[in-house]
Amino acid sequence: MGLFGPAWDTSNPRKRDKAIASVNRIGDDAELLEIATNAQLVEVAVAAVNRISDPAVLANVFREGNRNIVDDSGKPDRRNGPTRVRKAAAQRLGDDGLAALAREGGGLSSGEALVE
């Protein structure tokens, strides 16, 4: 934890590597979910997604997304950042996990493209 909060909770791109390193030391899926859905830097959120082991938590990240992502200038990135976080969760879930989400109506819209 930094002076005022956790190292991952930054919008400063110069602190990106330190933030990712702090995420890479976390093994608790609940904490990783918090980071994946609330981090301001997309790389930090994706690093958290990549460490989540529970498919149910990944499904939650896919459903929730992350609306806090900012670009390198600090402006909200409402399009690319959230999409990258959801795609990372979709890739981790794989075809079977996404099919299960679709069957239960877990956040997939008709014809939605998930993984490029």
Image (cartoon, helix red, strand yellow):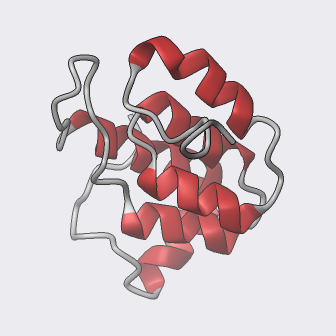
Relative to the observer, which residue lies in front, 97 or 28?
Answer: 28
56 vs 36: above or below: below
54 left or right, relative to 96: right
Relative to the observer, which residue lies in front, 72 or 1?
Answer: 1
> What residue is shown at x 45% (from left), y 88% (from top)?
104
Q: Position of residue 93 (x, y in %)?
A: 61, 57
Q: Position of residue 46 (x, y in %)?
A: 54, 38
> What residue is shown at x 41% (from left), y 17% (from top)?
13
Q: Residue furthest front?
A: 3
10 left or right, relative to 57: left
Dividing the picture into quadrants, the one containing residue 57 is bottom right
73 vs 102: above or below: above
**What number of labels is visible?**
0
18 vs 93: above or below: above
Relative to the observer, which residue lies in front, 96 or 22?
Answer: 22
Q: Position of residue 105 (x, y in %)?
A: 37, 84
> What residue is shown at x 49% (from left), y 29% (from top)?
43
Q: Residue furthest bottom?
A: 104
> What residue is shown at x 36% (from left), y 54% (from top)?
66
